[in-house]
């Protein structure tokens, strides 16, 4: 056994998630979600829904939507494609668990370490987001999900509570850049 055990780090290379409180806005790095992507195989849509509905408690969300369930979240990411998420502490091998459930109806890939997630909470997030992307946050309601560019980064934004609570998914390799963008924008509206 090695005398140097490995210790996981967050996307911002810390032992614990980074939390920034700037004025009335809180930006929190969220490393606690296991993420699996799901792509339905040709002609297997109904079979996939049949297998997943008992697990999710409802159908997979449609275009531009996300569903937050007790232990799982599902986000539509494209035609026949979704991200499924669950707490990593409960499901450390989440992609494998999903592959076992969906069998040959869909392709499943591990995404957990490919993304950084920032939860942004505040009284009014519209001014912050207006500075970093061309998304009309005021038009988003609970459960809306969309892709957009933040600076040059392809991101996924999920509205958890209209105008007040969003999650931003960005490439893990650009976590520090995305964090800097968010903090700078929050300081400019604080």
Image (tube, rainbow, N blue to C red):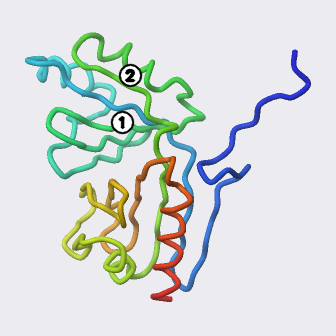
Horizontal arrangement in the rendering, residue 190 relative to residue 141 (left or right): right
* Residue 146 place in picture, x, y as percent: 24, 56
Which quadrant does the N terminus fall into?
A: top right
Instruction: Give the class, few, some or many, for how many residues have Cα within 10 Å of label 1's Cα (few <14, many ≥20).
Output: many
Residue at 45 percent of width and 88 percent of height:
189
> Residue 84, labelled with which disc?
1
> Which quadrant of the figure has residue 141?
bottom left
In the depicted structure, whether residue 56 falls above or below residue 166:
above
Residue furthest right as drawn: 3
CB of mark 2 within 8 Å of CB of mark 1?
yes
Residue 102 quadrant = top left
Whichever of labels 2 and 1 marks the residue nearer the N terminus, that label is 1
Give the class, few, some or many, for how many residues have Cα within 10 Å of label 2's Cα (few <14, many ≥20): many
Residue at position x 75%, y 36% in the image = 7
Instruction: Identify the residue position indicated by label 2 in the image.
Output: 98
Instruction: Give how far apart the Cα atoms at labels 2 and 1 are.
Output: 9 Å
SS of the residue under disc 1:
strand
Residue 107 picture location, percent across and down: 28, 20
In the displayed structure, would residue 85 be above or below residue 65?
above
Q: Residue 6's mark? A: none
Residue at x-position 87% and y-position 20%: 2
């Amino acid at each position: 056994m090695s005398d140097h055990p490995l210790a996981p780090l967050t996307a911002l290379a810390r032992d614990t998630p980074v939390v920034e409180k700037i004025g009335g806005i809180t930006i929190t790095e969220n490393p606690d979600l296991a993420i699996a992507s799901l792509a339905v195989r040709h002609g297997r849509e109904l079979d996939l829904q049949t297998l997943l509905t008992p697990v999710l408690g409802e159908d997979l969300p449609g275009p531009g939507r996300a569903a937050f369930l007790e232990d799982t979240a599902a986000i539509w990411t494209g035609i026949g494609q979704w991200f499924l998420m669950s707490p990593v502490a409960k499901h450390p091998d989440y992609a494998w668990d999903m592959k076992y459930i969906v069998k040959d109806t869909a392709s499943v890939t591990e995404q957990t370490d490919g993304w950084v997630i920032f939860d942004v909470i505040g009284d009014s997030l519209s001014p912050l987001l207006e500075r970093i992307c061309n998304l009309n946050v005021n038009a988003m309601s609970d459960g809306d999900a969309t892709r957009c560019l933040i600076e040059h980064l392809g991101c996924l934004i999920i509205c958890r509570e209209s105008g007040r609570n969003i999650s931003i998914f960005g490439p893990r390799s650009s976590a520090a850049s995305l964090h800097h963008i968010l903090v700078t924008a929050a300081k400019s509206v604080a």
